[in-house]
Amino acid sequence: MQSNTAAVEIQRVNFANFSVENRKADPFTIVDGHYVGHDGFVVPKDFDEFHERFPEYVRNWVSRHVDRSAPREDVEDWAQDLLIHLRYLPATSKHREAGKQDIVQTFDPHKHHGANVARFFNYINLCLGNKFRTMHLKRMKNPLCRAGNVSIGGRFDESDSAQVDDEFCHAHSAYLRGRCQRQERQQDARQALAEFSEFLKREDSSVLPAMGAIAAGASTPGAGAKLLLTTRTDFCRMRSRLRELGRCFHSGERVPRKRRPYKRRVKSPEATLGSGA
């Protein structure tokens, strides 16, 4: 187990060369080739070090993101697949040109505004979430892995509730297909909403109240302002910023800087008298 502190020469990072969006990033240092956040957290250098220091992290992450009814064997399989995903970059990954071999090595504190423990594990969670979603969708497309499957036999036994015949399938195929499609869409929507919420927390958490008000049914600026105990102007500003972040989330573009609230200029009495003269 490696300590999160080290008594060695520290190389300071100059933020003067970074873009305007990153100037408010948390400061970090580089110690023995490791990124060290302002909270003293030492970012693992590669997957081997990550797995050595946090051996149960991926397994616990999977346990939190699967249904409680999921078999233990499935949880183990998903955890192993995600560990393999973190350990080996795809052969076509652009990061391999820079000599990187695993996902942990691709963490860049410049892009993630710091190297503290929250920002590092937020990056790991995003990587795990994207891969797990792909694995889950692929699994759902496999008829053998769908929950609630029943066996189809030539001889139908009414006493066996897990068996159906051809007549039952033909009579209910449209309904069953539609129900499965609705369940898949709901799962995709929940996953996308969770990823968007993480994106908002990372980029601009001030718009989260507006997102919650809209989800609660505030369909008009007046209703949203009343729910958040603010003015219509402030709610409209948060809603516009939320739409802007939504476009960046879907397109992958860089998030622009947040505009300052507009303040109307008030002419002084001297200027008013001067213009009248």
Image (tube, rainbow, N blue to C red):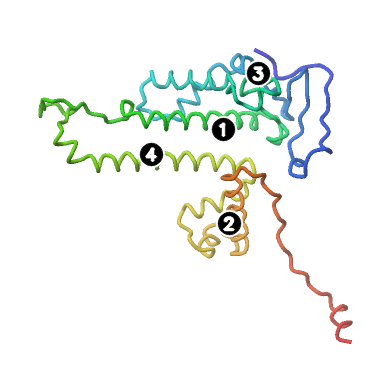
Residue for badge 1: 126
Residue labelled with disc 3:
46
CA neighbours of label 2 inside 10 A, class few (<14), some (14 to 19), many (20+): many
Ranked by sequence position, the earlier of labels 1 and 3 is: 3
Residue 116: image location, x then y, percent: 69, 30
In the rendered image, which quarter contains the N terminus?
top right
From the image, tell me which residue sits under label 2.
239
Badge 1 vs badge 3, beta-carbon distance below 8 Å: no
Q: Earlier in the sequence, mark 3 or mark 4?
A: 3
User: Disc 2 to disc 4, how far (Cα)?
Assistant: 29 Å
Q: Is residue 200 toward the left or the right of residue 271 in the image?
A: left
Q: Residue at x 87, y 78 (%)?
A: 271
Q: Nearer the viewer, mark 3 or mark 2?
A: 3
Q: Residue at x 53, y 51 (%)?
A: 211
Count residues near mark 1 (Cα–Cα under 10 Å), then give few for <14, some for 14-19, many for 20+.
some
Question: In the image, what residue type sits under mark 3?
Answer: Asp
User: Which amino acid type corresponds to the residue marked 4 in the rendered image?
Assistant: Glu
Q: Quadrant of the C terminus?
A: bottom right
Q: Nearer the viewer, residue 267 or 259?
A: 259
**Which secondary structure lies at badge 1?**
helix
